[in-house]
Image (cartoon, rainbow, N blue to C red):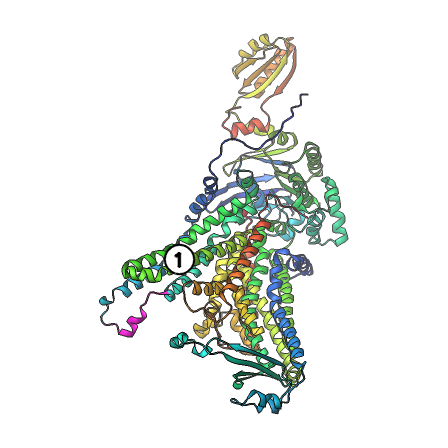
């Protein structure tokens, strides 16, 4: 089959019409919520950091060597003498037993002795040092970096792979691409397209293009916004060095993974919408397949969109804490090279689209069975 | 030409009782639901775990049948709050799947076929309609939640004796009340999704997506903001915390019980508002 | 060579185990052709088959020599107003018609001009800016018709096109069909309103249980039905005398006299013999004011062929 200029124009016309539906449909607003939620969360986190930094700095910074010199057992007066301007200072009397004694059933029955507790925090410009005093003696010292770009990047990697790729893009593409054909069948409007002088394959191409552009803009844009929102509050030298060295490359690969995710999942859900009356059941099966993928033999692992997408991600995402329901979704796959991942995704997409183009020529309008 | 003025009045004749009118809808809905093979299969699958739990209760009360089991393992065969918490957690997953399968078919077809005017032109209010639809789900989900839960409780009470019952009676109450709240939430989610998207099959996906995505969103909030209140956004987690408290078990770290109750209430109100907005006899095209 | 007919060759279509149409062979010439048959008889299936919305399980279909599997060519010469009472939620009447036209290669301005003309033809310009989803049933019927005619097709396929139209619009629509037919185009429609079919059709296709029962001009079809006596109403002054003369003819099976004794209903097995007999009676000096065939209508054909012959 040769592609004519008219067919290309028709495909673009269809794509433009469908894009309006994909971008502006009221029913599709939830897709924006899914795509932009990480950006909103990181932006909120950035605002929180700015606000906290201002609060911590209000009483001035304490030198790092001073806060490092605090040791357990020191009296509160000695510490305040060396560092008289804490960022936070709160004192109270505790009538309950210590947290560490909660399991000690015998002590619960003994009369409680009131304890004078005091919490003091210092800020040295990079770290927050939390000190806990009991009856005027330092009993606990916690040091945490106020800004931790490495940890932020780790969190972003986790969110991108476990929320964005597995849930947001998965369900977003499910909504966008299934709507293209199956949605029109449910609305009983697909026949209008079939009654235009357009080859079914061209119709498929136009609709797929519309879905791809819409999902790429929404999810690729969402990924970039999220990444920018993650980096935004990190203004330190280390963070700037990271942005200069690898920041743009990471942003590119996250956007690429999101785009290729839309490409792959889009083709799968478009085909599912054409081939099956109830695409939700296969969608659940695909979700399960993608989740158990890494337990399968290597050859089968490569039949998953996630396998290639995760290989494109610039940072690995290993998390310790997992919820039972989420654990079902968390299944790291063996990585492939980036070029192989891109090629693999494009090949899988081409294969699925070819199957979809065969299906679309056979499809019949029979709304009564929908 | 003769002109006949006619004044139309609502029907003032005898009516059946309110509940008998209302229960017509669930009656037919249940009939239809149990004709679906997938619903039946899932329903049977949902009852496997209660059967295993029943077996566990039997064995834990007949340890003499298992003389070769070491003593420390015997000590683990306790029927307590933890046991019922695990039971409830598992059945909750099945109830979500059942609701995703059965719930969307209750309202979406009525909306897509413009059938609501037909319902509301009969002695049936919008609230009646929602209650009737919810009754369908409550009935269905009860079969896999509190009914087997209470059966297990009575079985344990029967086998372990009066002492056990007087010590752990609150477990039965917790199973019933905990599942009642859960069924309410799940039913509202299923009905709201069904009313929101109008397409039965998409609504099914939305019900599953609701629970999966909110789980992800909750994790994300916790991870990004380094907090634990994000778990409130996850209805399954909130419910787990609530159940833990009701069953007298140590709640997992995270938000408190009352925060979870408040969040679940807010969720129910929002879902109720969606239903209120979507279930109208007329649609205005702007 | 490009064909001039819509041709079905031994076409069968089954929906699973349910029969759609069976072994249909048809040659539909230009003009107004009505598909007549009871609900579920296969009228819509035939229309969907010729426009490629469904595909036959057996046999072949060509529309002016084009295959329905080639919408790129077919839909340039064909317009189809389906009976699906649905429209995209986002579209106004104008958008509904003009959007499709852009796929024919028309520029946006041309598409809007053509859409406007089509909407004008169906009397819907005032509502052109309103959402189709908010239209009444009749308006939706008209906007679908506008969409079907907007690209000036050679073959116009219309499923129940007169449903829901008020009398004025109905008359205008019928005149539109006639204009199309007069230009040598195909207008293929289905209808339940047999009087209208009778009024506007050049030929009819009677279909029942997925099979073609009869096809052709109404008169021709009636002539072929020898098992049902033809009915004629004779208006005359001396009805009883003429009745006695006609009773002498072998081919006359039944005569009923009007209460006013100025008319007869005659049932005959041989139309030619009947015609000759009437000529003889007239030449003998009996006054005959008029002879009207009373069962040369789609209504009567329907009853004879599909409804069990109770006419």
Compared across the picture, whether B144 is left or right of C233 comes to left
On whether residue B69 falls in the magenta region, the answer is yes
Question: Residue beneath label 1, please?
Answer: B173
Residue B44 against residue C169 in the figure, above or below: below
Residue B203: x, y in percent?
53, 55
Residue range highlighted in magenta: B68-80
Residue A225 appears in the figure: yes
Q: How many marks?
A: 1
Residue C100: x, y in percent?
68, 51
Compared across the picture, whether C37 is left or right of A235 comes to left
Q: Which residue lies at the image location 56% right of the left edge and 90% below the top edge?
A: A70
Residue B141 against residue A293 in the figure, above or below: above
Residue B132 against residue B48 in the figure, above or below: above
Q: Which residue lies at the image location 50% right of the left edge and 45% below the top edge?
A: C13
On whether residue B79 falls in the magenta region, the answer is yes
| Rendered-image quadrant of the N terminus of chain A | bottom right
Residue B23: x, y in percent?
46, 43
């Amino acid at each position: 089959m040769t592609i004519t200029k008219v067919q290309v124009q028709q495909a673009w016309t269809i794509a433009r019409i469908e894009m309006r539906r994909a971008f502006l449909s009221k029913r599709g607003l939830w897709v924006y919520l899914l795509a932009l939620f990480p950006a909103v969360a990181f932006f909120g986190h950035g605002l929180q950091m700015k606000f906290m930094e201002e609060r911590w700095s209000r009483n001035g910074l304490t030198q790092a060597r001073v806060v490092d010199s605090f040791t357990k057992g020191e009296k509160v007066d000695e510490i305040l003498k060396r560092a008289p301007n804490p960022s936070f200072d709160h004192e109270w009397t505790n009538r309950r037993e210590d947290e560490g004694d909660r399991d000690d059933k015998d002590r619960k029955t003994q009369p409680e002795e009131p304890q004078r507790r005091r919490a003091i925090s210092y800020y040295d410009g990079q770290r927050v040092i939390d000190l806990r005093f009991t009856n005027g003696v330092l009993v606990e010292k916690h040091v945490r970096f106020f800004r931790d770009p490495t940890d932020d990047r780790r969190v972003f990697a986790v969110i991108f792979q476990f929320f964005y790729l597995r849930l947001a893009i998965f369900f977003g593409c499910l909504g966008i691409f299934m709507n293209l054909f199956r949605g029109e069948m449910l609305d009983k409007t697909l026949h209008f397209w079939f009654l235009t002088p357009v080859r079914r394959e061209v119709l498929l191409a136009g609709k797929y293009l519309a879905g791809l552009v819409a999902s790429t803009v929404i999810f690729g844009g969402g990924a970039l916004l999220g990444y920018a929102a993650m980096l935004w509050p990190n203004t330190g030298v280390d963070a700037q060095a990271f942005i200069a060295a690898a920041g743009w490359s990471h942003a590119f690969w996250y956007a690429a993974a999101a785009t290729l995710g839309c490409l792959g999942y889009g083709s799968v859900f478009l085909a599912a919408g054409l081939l099956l009356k109830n695409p939700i059941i296969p969608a659940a099966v695909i979700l399960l397949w993608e989740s158990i993928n890494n337990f399968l033999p290597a050859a089968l692992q490569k039949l998953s969109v996630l396998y290639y997408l995760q290989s494109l991600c610039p940072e690995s995402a290993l998390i310790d804490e997992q919820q039972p329901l989420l654990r079902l979704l968390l299944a790291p796959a063996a990585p492939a090279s980036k070029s192989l991942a891109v090629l693999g995704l494009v090949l899988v997409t081409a294969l699925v689209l070819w199957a979809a183009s065969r299906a679309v020529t056979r499809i019949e309008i029979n709304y009564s069975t929908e | 030409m003769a002109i006949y003025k006619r004044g139309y009045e609502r029907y003032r004749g005898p009516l059946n009782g309110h509940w008998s009118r209302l229960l017509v809808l669930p009656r037919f809905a249940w009939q239809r639901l149990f004709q679906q093979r997938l619903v039946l299969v899932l329903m049977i699958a949902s009852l496997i775990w209660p059967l295993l739990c029943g077996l566990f209760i039997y064995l834990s009360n007949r340890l003499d049948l298992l003389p070769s089991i070491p003593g420390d393992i015997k000590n683990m065969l306790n029927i307590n709050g933890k046991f019922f918490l695990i039971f409830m957690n598992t059945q909750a997953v099945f109830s979500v799947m059942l609701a995703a399968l059965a719930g969307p078919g209750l309202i979406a077809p009525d909306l897509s076929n413009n059938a609501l005017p037909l319902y509301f032109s009969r002695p049936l209010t919008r609230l009646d309609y929602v209650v009737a639809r919810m009754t369908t789900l409550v009935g269905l989900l009860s079969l896999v939640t509190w009914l087997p839960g209470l059966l297990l409780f009575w079985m344990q009470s029967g086998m372990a004796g009066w002492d056990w019952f007087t010590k752990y009676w609150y477990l039965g109450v917790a199973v019933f009340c905990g599942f009642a709240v859960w069924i309410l939430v799940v039913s509202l989610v299923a009905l709201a999704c069904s009313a929101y998207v109008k397409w039965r099959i998409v609504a099914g996906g939305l019900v599953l997506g609701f629970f999966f995505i909110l789980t992800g969103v909750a994790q994300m909030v916790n991870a990004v903001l380094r907090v634990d209140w994000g778990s409130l956004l996850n209805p399954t987690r909130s419910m787990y915390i609530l159940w833990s408290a009701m069953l007298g078990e140590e709640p997992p770290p995270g938000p408190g019980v009352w925060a979870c109750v408040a969040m679940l209430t807010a969720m129910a109100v929002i879902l109720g508002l969606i239903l209120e907005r979507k279930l109208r006899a007329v649609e205005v095209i702007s | 060579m490009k064909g001039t007919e819509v041709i079905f060759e031994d076409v069968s279509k089954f929906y699973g185990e349910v029969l759609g149409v069976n072994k249909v062979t048809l040659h539909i010439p230009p003009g107004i052709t009505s598909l007549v048959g009871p609900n579920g008889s296969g009228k819509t299936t035939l229309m969907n088959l010729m426009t490629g919305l469904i595909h036959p399980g057996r046999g072949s279909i060509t529309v002016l020599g084009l295959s329905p599997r080639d919408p790129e060519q077919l839909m340039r010469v064909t317009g189809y107003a389906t009976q699906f009472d649905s429209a995209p939620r986002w579209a106004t009447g104008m958008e509904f018609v003009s959007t499709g036209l852009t796929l024919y290669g028309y520029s946006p301005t041309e598409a809007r001009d053509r859409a406007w003309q089509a909407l004008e033809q169906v009397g819907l310009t005032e509502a052109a800016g309103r959402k189709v989803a908010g239209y009444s049933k009749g308006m939706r019927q008209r906007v679908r018709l506008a969409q079907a005619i907007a690209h000036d097709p050679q073959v116009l396929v219309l499923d129940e096109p007169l449903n829901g139209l008020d009398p004025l619009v109905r008359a205008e629509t019928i005149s539109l069909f006639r204009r199309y037919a007069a230009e040598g185009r195909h207008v293929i429609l289905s209808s339940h309103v047999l009087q209208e079919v009778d009024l506007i059709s050049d030929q009819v296709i009677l279909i029942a249980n997925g099979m073609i029962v009869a096809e052709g001009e109404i008169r021709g079809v009636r002539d072929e039905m020898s098992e049902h006596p033809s009915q004629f109403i004779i208006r005359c002054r001396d009805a009883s005398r003429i009745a006695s003369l006609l009773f002498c003819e072998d081919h006359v099976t039944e005569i009923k006299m009007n209460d006013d004794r100025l008319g007869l209903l005659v049932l005959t097995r041989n139309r030619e013999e009947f015609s000759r007999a009437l000529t003889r009676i007239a030449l003998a000096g009996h006054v005959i004011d008029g002879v009207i065939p009373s069962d040369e209508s789609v209504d009567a054909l329907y009853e004879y062929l599909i409804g069990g012959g109770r006419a």
